[in-house]
Amino acid sequence: MEVLKIFFSGILGTLMMTVFSHILELLTGSKFNEAHLLNGLLNRSKFSNSNIQKNNFLGWILHFTIGICMAAMLYFYYLYISNYISLWLGIVLGFVLGIIGIAGWLIMKNCHSKPPEINWYSFFVQLVVAHVVFGVVVTWVFIRFIFKN
């Protein structure tokens, strides 16, 4: 049952983070949709011989899979390392996950021969805030359904 709750928290956290990115994309005109950017990397990859469009399911599956894995990381942190859970800690851990996210995107960008042409600085700033949203949502699910006092 815990696995389903972790899965659900990862899906919900990723969904809310993606909604945040979409809203910011609409307001600024910048490209912030993580799944679309992942598809851009996949499409231009030397390992791909197919034409992957920006809204292909592969980017979405990858994006949500990473979110579920990050939710599992938070779960194990709360379970084994921290004896305290709060939305404030969710903010801090979301920020940390944002920094980890930046590192992952930098690795993918720098290892790619033709990364998407976007304003990477703006993307990374919004990525950190989006992960704070993720951290708060996942932590809220954990408080509500797993680590009840």
Image: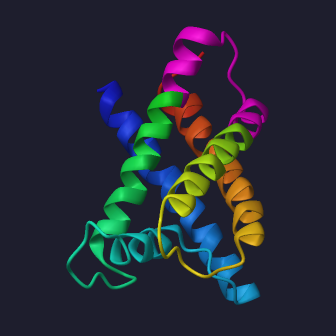
Is residue 148 visible in the rendered image? The answer is no
Which region is colored magenta? Answer: 74-93
Question: As drawn, is 38 to the left or to the right of 128?
Answer: left
Question: As drawn, is 90 to the left or to the right of 40?
Answer: right
Is residue 91 within the magenta segment? yes
Majority secondary structure of magenta residues = helix
Question: As drawn, is 38 to the left or to the right of 42?
Answer: right
Report the residue at 65% width, 13% height from top. Answer: 82
Question: As drawn, is 142 to the left or to the right of 69?
Answer: right
Is residue 81 visible in the rendered image? The answer is yes
Can you give x and y, in whole percent of width and height, for residue 70 in the image? 49, 39
If the image is split into quadrants, where does the C terminus sit?
top right
Residue 144, quarter of the rendered image: top right
74, above or below 110, in the image: above
Q: Which is nearer the eye, 145 or 105? A: 105
148, above or below 145, in the image: above
Can you give x and y, in whole percent of width and height, for residue 125 in the image? 77, 62
